[in-house]
Image (cartoon, grey):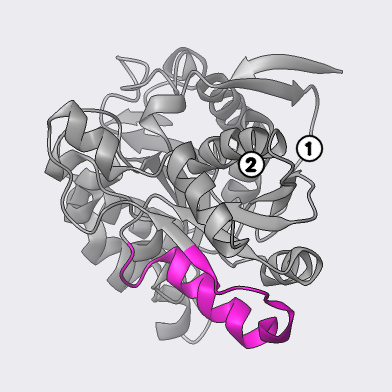
């Protein structure tokens, strides 16, 4: 049986189930307890689990991320919520220099099973310091796993898998899409980390994306179908480890690839995918790999600038027609 849940409720359900299952799991972050979460993802959790397991923190990301890392090294399984990954920049020392390196620096003696979660990416008119996309930043660090998705079913299963995983995980959500709805099965299930999902099958071109840009890709694919172009849409779901096999197999079928990536173009996820495809599927390409990224500038406040900055279905359609020479 499935129900229709929005993303915030799916994430809430995942955390509650894992905290009931394992007493070593706890949630810590800004406004997660008394206020039920900045985006109400932790609604009702303080009432059920109490202040020792649902912990409000000061506005001090470096501090509470460090407490979480220490707790993970000592056998607990913390979930650290950042109100936004933009604020998590302050905590990068703990994430990059401690959480990601604990296992290798200790020669396997200490692990760091911790989940850092919160929204990444633009969310409207929030200007330069609150609109950045951090998947490629975190995916650049050995020792970290990076998950980024907005499908409620998959996000519930991925968060449960992340909480149980023995590695530190950066879990990327979307501020704009906590209300995004989808079917979520009842009962226990896990979604595997490192596996993508084909959201739409097609034969003429492969469109690869993740998080809310998958919806942009799907919109473009629907419009392209009306023009007789069959697009296959792949949702990466996990950025590191990346499901290279799924992308390569799709390109071997369609012979063309467009990557839709909200992050900046230089050194990003789309650049990594383009490299992998030219290495493992070069002979199958009938056109160069094309990318649709956000503009290579900081995002301003004006709504016209936001519209021009972000990928949208029209930009994706133009890219698809480019690789199809139409």
> Is 279 included in the stretch rendered in magenta?
yes
Answer above or below: position of 90 versus 307: below
Q: Quadrant of residue 73?
A: bottom left
Across and down, in percent, residue 193 comes to 66, 56
Quarter of the image where the C terminus is located: bottom right
Res 15 label? none
SS for dot 2: helix
Find out whether residue 277 is within the magenta segment: yes
144 is higher (above) or lower (below) than 45:
below
Disc 1 target residue: 189
Looking at the rendered structure, the secondary structure element under dot 1 is loop
Comes first in the chain, label 2 or label 1 = 2
- Quarter occupied by residue 243: bottom right
Q: Read off the magenta span.
A: 265-290
Task: Give me the residue at 61% from left, 57% from top.
Answer: 165
Residue 187 x, y percent position in the rendering: 81, 26
How many marks on residues? Answer: 2
Picture coordinates of residue 257 (x, y %)?
61, 64
**Which x, y percent locates residue 269?**
45, 65
Direction from residue 240 to residue 142 in the image, left or right = left
Disc 2 to disc 1: CB gap under 8 Å: yes
Mark 2, residue position:
160
């Amino acid at each position: 049986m499935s129900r229709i849940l929005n993303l915030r409720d799916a994430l809430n359900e995942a955390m509650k189930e894992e905290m009931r299952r394992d007493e070593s799991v706890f949630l810590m972050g800004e406004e997660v307890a008394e206020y039920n979460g900045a985006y109400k993802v932790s609604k009702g959790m303080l009432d059920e689990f109490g202040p020792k397991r649902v912990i409000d923190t000061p506005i001090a990301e470096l501090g509470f991320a460090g407490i979480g890392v220490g707790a993970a090294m000592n056998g607990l399984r913390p979930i650290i919520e950042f109100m936004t990954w933009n604020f998590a920049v302050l905590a990068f020392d703990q994430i990059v220099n401690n959480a990601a390196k604990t296992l290798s620096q200790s020669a396997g003696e200490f692990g760091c099973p911790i989940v850092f979660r919160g929204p990444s990416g633009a969310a409207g008119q929030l200007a330069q310091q609150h609109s950045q996309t951090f998947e490629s930043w975190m995916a650049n660090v050995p020792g970290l796993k990076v998950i980024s998705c907005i499908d409620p079913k998959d996000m519930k299963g991925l968060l449960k898998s992340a909480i149980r995983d023995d590695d530190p995980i950066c879990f990327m959500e979307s501020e704009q899409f906590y209300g995004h709805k989808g079917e979520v099965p009842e009962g226990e299930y896990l979604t595997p980390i490192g596996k993508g999902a084909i959201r739409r099958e097609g034969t003429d071109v492969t469109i690869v994306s993740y998080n809310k840009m998958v919806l942009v890709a799907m919109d473009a694919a629907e419009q392209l179908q009306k023009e007789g172009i069959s697009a296959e849409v792949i949702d990466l779901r996990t950025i590191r480890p990346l499901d290279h096999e799924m992308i390569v197999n799709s390109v071997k079928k369609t012979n063309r690839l467009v990557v839709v990536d909200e992050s900046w173009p230089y050194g990003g996820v789309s650049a990594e995918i383009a490299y992998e495809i030219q290495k493992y599927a070069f002979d199958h390409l009938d056109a160069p790999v094309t990318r649709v990224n956000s503009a290579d500038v900081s995002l301003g406040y004006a709504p016209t600038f936001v519209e021009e900055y972000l990928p949208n279905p029209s930009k994706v359609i133009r890219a698809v027609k480019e690789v199809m020479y139409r």
